[in-house]
Image: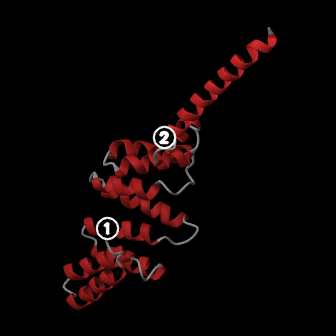
Amino acid sequence: MLLKSRPVFFIAIAAVLSFAAFQRNTVWMGRAAIWLDAAQKAPLKARPHANVGLFYDMAGDLDMARDEYKRAIQLEPDYLAPYGPLAVIYGKKGDIDMAINMLLWAIERLPGKDPKFNTALGVAYRAKGMLKEAEMEFQEALRVNPYYDTAHYNLAQVYEQIGLKDEALKHYRSFLETAAPNP
């Protein structure tokens, strides 16, 4: 009797394991699904929440993105990855002062320089009409990475606004030379 029930037992185990593998493989179908799954399984870790925020951000759901970034910061205040994107969301929603404060706070704590943070701060300053401060941040971004196309473009716009046409043209050219080609 024991020998007859063995094949049924192994078939049942194989069926259960196959179903579990199928369910797990559906998680790996997309990066968003991976991070949503990671955030569910590790709700007290900042990185999965920051990455879920990034996917909501890319999908245009700024409120959900903001909530995920804020959750990541609550969980791990020294994890700097969500600060930049959260500041950009504040800027998009019109709270430029909050964006500036958040970027200033993060820039002070960055272990290495990141031109994206300086460029984001420059954009926020420019939105407030603080063109001299914006210029300084874009220049700082270019000191860190002279090939950072976004900083060249934004610096060109500031120079154009303040009437320095030759400087603007120089940075527009640098932007075109450093920008990644679109396929």
Residue for badge 2: 36
Q: Where residue 146 sits: x, y (%)?
A: 43, 83
In this view, 165 is above or below 103: below
Residue for badge 1: 123
Q: Where residue 83 sits: x, y (%)?
A: 46, 56
Q: Residue furthest bottom?
A: 166
Secondary structure beneath dot 2 equals helix
Closest to the observer: 136 or 34?
A: 34
| Residue drawn at the location 33% of the way across and 58% of the way down | 97
Closest to the observer: 178 or 65?
A: 178
Q: Residue furthest right?
A: 2
Circle 2: residue type = Leu
Residue 15 has which mark? none
| Residue drawn at the location 41% of the way across and 49% of the way down | 55
Nearest to N terminus: mark 1 or mark 2: 2
Can residue 142 be spotted in the picture? yes
Count of all numbered marks drawn on residues in the image? 2
Circle 2 residues within 10 Å: few <14, some 14–19, many ≥20:
some
Circle 1: residue type = Val
Closest to the observer: 76 or 9?
A: 9
Can residue 132 be spotted in the picture? no
Quarter of the image with the N terminus is top right
Tag 1 near tag 2, CB within 8 Å: no
Secondary structure beneath dot 1 equals helix
Q: Quadrant of residue 167?
A: bottom left
Q: Where residue 15 sits: x, y (%)?
A: 61, 25
Q: Is residue 119 left or right of residue 16?
A: left
| Residue drawn at the location 56% of the way across and 43% of the way down | 75
Q: Where residue 183 sits: x, y (%)?
A: 32, 70
| Residue drawn at the location 36% of the way across and 75% of the way down | 180
Q: CA distance from mark 1 to mark 2?
A: 31 Å
Q: Is residue 92 left or right of residue 85?
A: left
